[in-house]
Amino acid sequence: MHDSHTHAGHTPAKLGKNRWRTILPLGVLAAFGAAVVAGVAAGVVPNPLHASTANAGVGTPSGEAIPTVKVVKPKRESSVAITVDQIATVEPFFQADLRARASGTVKSVLRDIGDKVKKGEVLVVIDVPESEQDVFRMDAMILQRQQELRVSDAKLKDAKAAKDVSAATIKQRLAEVEGATATRDLKKRKYARFQDLAAKGSVVGSVVEEEERDYLSSEAVVTSTKANVERARADYAESESKIEAAAADIDLKKAQVEVARKDLDRAKAVADYAKIVAPFDGVVVRRTVDPGSFVQNATTGTSEALISVAKVDVVSVTAKFPDAIAPSVDLNTPAIVTIDDLPGVSIAAAVTRFAPTVQNADRTMRVEIDLFNGDDEEFRHLAECIKKGGPDRQAKGANQAMPVRAFAPDGAKSRKLLPGMTGTIKLTIGGFGDSHVLPSTAVYSRSGTSYILLVQDGKTKQVPVRVQVTDGKTVRLAVIEKRKGADGGSRDFLTELTGREEVVVARQLEIGDGANVKPAPSDW
């Protein structure tokens, strides 16, 4: 029976071998077909049905229909806006890590973590005895210099009194000269009369000699009184020089008093190095020192922060945005801040400040948004400080506007923005100038490259592009063109859309490049 069902010359082994020769090609063909279907679905292999349709206008019968594609034109209307969001971090408005400026043992720690502090308030005191002694010594030196100044003032008064005495003495000596001169003149005339009498023989010669002696004696008295006048005048000049010397000594003593005061100020400044004070109103966020700890001067390079103070009633939410949107960001750019740890909270604000430069390391621009994070009392105090201006304003830069409140007054006590929280900043970018935008569906990817599909003269053309900004709905892009560079090689150049292009917004991979299509303009 078995032999009757077997062809002549074929054994069962040969029949099995023939079956595999038949099944194996069929399996290969099925695998190839599956790969083609997957390639068509991925857009790598053109759809033969659409390819035949696309060739209908060229080499196919005129009865085949040309596919209709939806196309749009780029817009540059001012109403067109793009929202761009980036991961953001909440930072304190100010933060300072305070280090020791003097070496010594910590005497006292006056504030702890969580304590609110005012500007200038002492936080940590370091025991530096030699600095305190310098203050006492300089204070005593000022007292000494002030006493020396009083002595110089007294000497000046003595010199002025001596000058007055010398002036009176000069008058007295001049009067004596006049008296001596009168006496001399009298005795001279008397001596002359006695000489006449002696010549007549009325008196003896001895009497004439006595009168001559009296006359010569009066002449000597006149000479002496005149010398006394010169001496009095010399004393007067000396008293004037003593007045000048006393006045100069007073100026010197005053200068020495000022020097002593400067030395005292310096000694106090050095002594103040032992006190770590709050540089601004804030709260203590970190403390690493206890009383009795030995600390070193920060100038030695081995000191660490003893206490950290942060201003958290106002916080800065910061993010880095790509360089493509940098030219479109200004202080009026609207922003929405969301915080990961506060679901449902959305804070509407505007850009407070931004860095007018792009960092080469990551090609980003820093953007900051200030938000008020305190209670009503702190809000009123901040508003008053900003209005008043001056050093108590505690602001960044010359111009500081009142920040937006992060929470309504009734919710400010229950919710706070804490430095270190993360979230997002969403910017609404508009005003692209001559740049055009498209719907995001106009861009598709192929082998890692972004493209748009244009319709030119009824045929599709695949054009590579570089996406600059997109929010998933709208996209701003630049067309990549190959041009010959200065070195003769081919280089990529970016060009803007003109606004006249017809861009396919759906089924780009299915339609493919170089297909004949019928554009259907659509508004967006």
Image (cartoon, rainbow, N blue to C red):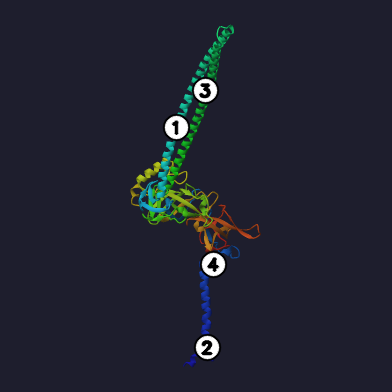
Q: Amino acid at mark 1?
A: Asp
Of labels 3 and 4, earlier in sequence is 4
In the rendered image of this protein, does residue 190 appear above or below residue 293?
Answer: above
Residue with the mark numbered 4: 44
**Closer mark to the observer between disc 3 and disc 4:** 3
Q: Amino acid at mark 4?
A: Val
Total marks in image: 4
Asked if disc 2 and disc 3 are in contact, CB closer than 8 Å, the reply is no
Residue with the mark numbered 1: 153
Of labels 2 and 4, earlier in sequence is 2
**Closer mark to the observer between disc 2 and disc 4:** 4
Of labels 3 and 1, earlier in sequence is 1
* Label 1 Cα neighbours within 10 Å, binned few <14 / some 14-19 / many ≥20: some
Secondary structure beneath label 4: loop
Residue 356 rendering spot, x and y as whole percentages: 52, 49
Q: Amino acid at mark 2?
A: Lys
Of labels 2 and 1, earlier in sequence is 2
- Inter-mark Cα distance, 1 to 4: 106 Å
Is residue 37 shown to the viewer in this render?
yes
* Label 2 Cα neighbours within 10 Å, binned few <14 / some 14-19 / many ≥20: few
**142 left or right of 458?**
left
Asked if disc 3 and disc 4 are in contact, CB closer than 8 Å, the reply is no
Label disc, if present, on residue 228 of the rendered structure: 3
- Identified at 53% across, 74% down, the residue is 32
